[in-house]
Image (cartoon, grey):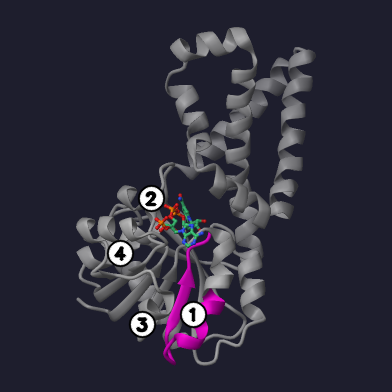
């Protein structure tokens, strides 16, 4: 059932394209206008069925939109919001999908939204490959979808957005920006750094590197999957969530040092305890 007449999606890559596909495949939006950077992306998105129209002009794309998703790289989210604000209709709802939320919500606080509602968003769904050709209608299905409310907000606007997110299969989690950023620093951002460091360590040891190509199997694949992500997205994440990443990195280093010490001292009890403690919590998370 159509929930919203006109949706504008700015940034039509993996996430923006998947939102368009999810909205149109489920009949939740009448019109989805896509606004990427390059004309080829419009053609690809139209061919996929991720949008009903495309334009390279922001102002044209967002005119009369009821709902706007900003799905650009993180540093462009606030400049984009600033640029579209004067052209949005009163009552429009804007949300973003950026992987970090603290600085975005801080910057939004400084803006005069003038009848427009903004909610921070972060779908906890994705993959290592980017671009609209990677988009999937079911990317958000049964995945957590974070929503961050500003201190003052319009409840009707929030509920309208929640209906859309639920409609595309997302499991809404409302959380404040700081808690979000610390939690994702631990479960999403630090793992990128750890995976990249592990791969680089292997690559840096000549003998290991040569054998790794033949020996590496599922364990190494699972442990390092996120190292194959887009380096530019990783940079944006680290640069906009620096304090939280450094906080969890300090904790992680302590944990590694416990292992190192136990191994040097042949403290078998400590090694087993640490592995058992980790197994228990991980099994709980994914049970
Ligand atoms: P993506 O596939 O690389 O898509 C980025 C989109 O933004 C493309 O449509 C691109 O246009 C456009 N764009 C790139 N640079 C631009 C520029 N300088 N000016 C204007 N438009 C530009 O990226 P994505 O993975 O969808 O990520 C988009 C957002 O989602 C990011 O904020 C990220 O933090 C967030 N996010 C990503 C994931 C993930 O797993 N990838 C998960 C959750 C949230 P063209 O295609 O025309 O070049």
Picture residue at 56% right of the left edge, 47% below the top: 232
Q: Secondary structure at mark 4?
A: helix
Element assignment for label 3: loop
Label 1 neighbourhood size at 10 Å, few (<14), some (14-19), many (20+)? some
Q: Is residue 114 left or right of residue 134?
A: right
Q: Residue at x 33, y 60 (%)?
A: 39
Mark earlier in primary sequence (3, 1): 3
Please state, as top left, top right, bottom left or bottom right, where the N terminus lies in the image: bottom left
Distance CA(mark 1)–CA(mark 4) = 19 Å
Tell me if the residue at label 1 has its CB under 8 Å from ligand 1: no
Task: Give how far apart the Cα atoms at labels 1 and 2 are.
Answer: 23 Å
Q: Earlier in the sequence, mark 4 or mark 2?
A: 4
The numbered disc on residue 20 is 4
Magenta span: 81-98
Quarter of the image where one finds residue 36: bottom left
Ligand 1 closer than 8 Å to the CB at disc 2?
yes
- The residue tagged 3 is 65
- For residue 131, the mark is 2
Classify mark 4: residues with Cα within 10 Å, few (<14), some (14-19) or many (20+).
Answer: many
Q: Position of residue 62 (x, y in %)?
A: 39, 79
Tell me: residue 92, above or below residue 167: below
Q: Earlier in the sequence, mark 1 or mark 4?
A: 4
Residue 84: numbered disc: 1
159 relative to 80, above or below: below
> Which label's residue is closer to the chain start, 1 or 2?
1
Q: Position of residue 13 (x, y in %)?
A: 39, 55
Q: Nearer the viewer, mark 3 or mark 1?
A: 1
The quadrant of the rendering that contains the C terminus is top left
Q: Secondary structure at mark 1?
A: helix
| Crowd around label 3: few <14 · some 14–19 · many ≥20 (10 Å) | many
């Amino acid at each position: 059932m159509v929930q919203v007449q006109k949706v504008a999606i700015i940034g039509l890559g993996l996430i923006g394209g998947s939102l368009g596909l999810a909205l149109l495949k489920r009949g939740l939006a009448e019109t989805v206008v896509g606004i990427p950077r390059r004309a080829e992306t419009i053609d690809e998105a139209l061919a996929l069925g991720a949008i009903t129209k495309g334009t390279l002009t922001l102002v044209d794309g967002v005119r009369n939109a009821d709902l706007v998703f900003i799905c650009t790289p993180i540093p462009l989210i606030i400049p984009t919001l600033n640029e579209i604000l004067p052209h949005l209709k009163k009552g429009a709802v804007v949300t973003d999908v950026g992987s970090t939320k603290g600085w975005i919500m801080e910057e939004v606080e400084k803006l005069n939204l003038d009848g427009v509602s903004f909610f921070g968003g972060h779908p906890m769904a994705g993959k290592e490959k980017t671009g609209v050709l990677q988009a999937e209608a079911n990317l958000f299905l049964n995945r957590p979808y974070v929503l961050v409310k500003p201190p003052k907000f319009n409840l009707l606007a929030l509920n309208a957005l929640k209906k859309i997110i639920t409609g595309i299969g997302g499991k809404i989690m409302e959380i404040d920006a700081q808690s979000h950023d610390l939690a994702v620093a631990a479960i999403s951002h630090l793992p990128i750094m750890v995976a990249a460091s592990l791969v680089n360590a292997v690559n840096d040891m000549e003998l290991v590197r040569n054998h790794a190509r033949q020996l590496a199997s599922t364990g190494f694949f699972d442990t390092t999957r996120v190292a194959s992500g887009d380096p530019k997205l990783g940079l944006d994440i680290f640069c906009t969530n620096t304090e939280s990443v450094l906080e969890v990195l300090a904790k992680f280093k302590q944990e590694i040092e416990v292992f190192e010490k136990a191994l040097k001292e042949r403290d078998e009890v400590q090694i087993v305890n640490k592995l058992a403690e980790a197994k228990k919590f991980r099994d709980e998370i994914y049970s």
